[in-house]
Amino acid sequence: MTHATEIIRIHEDSGEDAWPFGTRVVSHIGSACVIEGTGDYTPEELHLVRRRFPGRYVTLDGDVITVWPPSSPRGR
């Protein structure tokens, strides 16, 4: 049986305007961050998260914004 090696942290508050309006839960899996909302996020809310994580790949899929782990150099 395999076990997850990454720590999962759920709902960490980081200030009043840290997350888009309607955010239900923020979870971290290793260095990835998943932001789940009570409804669909807007492109403006996606840009808010992108500004918080400069240089990271951030995607929007309805009510979920995902901040992907930083890419690592090939061969490592």
Image (cartoon, rainbow, N blue to C red):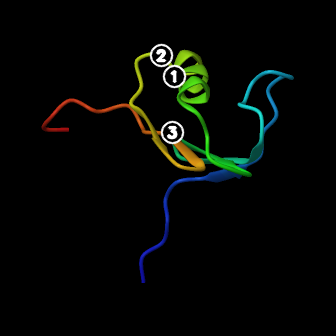
Question: Mark 1 or mark 2: which is in front?
Answer: 1
Task: Name the quadrant of the N terminus.
Answer: bottom left
Q: Front-most of 74 and 48? A: 48
The answer to whether marks 3 and 2 mark residues whose Cβ atoms lie closer than 8 Å is: no
Q: Front-most of 28 and 37? A: 37
Q: CA distance from mark 3 to mark 2?
A: 14 Å
Q: Which residue is most to the left?
A: 75
Residue 55 quadrant = top left
Question: Mark 1 or mark 3: which is in front?
Answer: 1
Q: Residue at x 61, y 40 (%)?
A: 41
Q: CA distance from mark 1 to mark 2?
A: 6 Å
Residue 22 quadrant = top right
From the image, tell me which residue sits under label 1: 50
- Amino acid, disc 1: Arg
User: Which SS class for mark 2?
Assistant: loop
Closer to the N terminus: mark 3 or mark 2?
3
Q: Residue at x 61, y 28 (%)?
A: 45
Closer to the N terminus: mark 1 or mark 3?
3
- Please tell me how crowded label 3 is: few (under 14), some (14-19), or many (20+) other residues with Cα within 10 Å: few
Task: Name the quadrant of the C terminus.
Answer: top left
From the image, tell me which residue sits under label 3: 31
Side (left or right) of 45 relative to 60: right
Q: Residue at x 58, y 26 (%)?
A: 49
- Please tell me how crowded label 2 is: few (under 14), some (14-19), or many (20+) other residues with Cα within 10 Å: few
User: Which SS class for mark 3?
Assistant: loop
The answer to whether marks 1 and 2 mark residues whose Cβ atoms lie closer than 8 Å is: yes
Q: Front-most of 74 and 19? A: 19
From the image, tell me which residue sits under label 2: 54
Relative to 37, residue 50 above or below? above
Estimate the x, y position of residue 21 in percent, counting from the top left: 77, 33
- Amino acid, disc 2: Pro
User: Which SS class for mark 1?
Assistant: helix
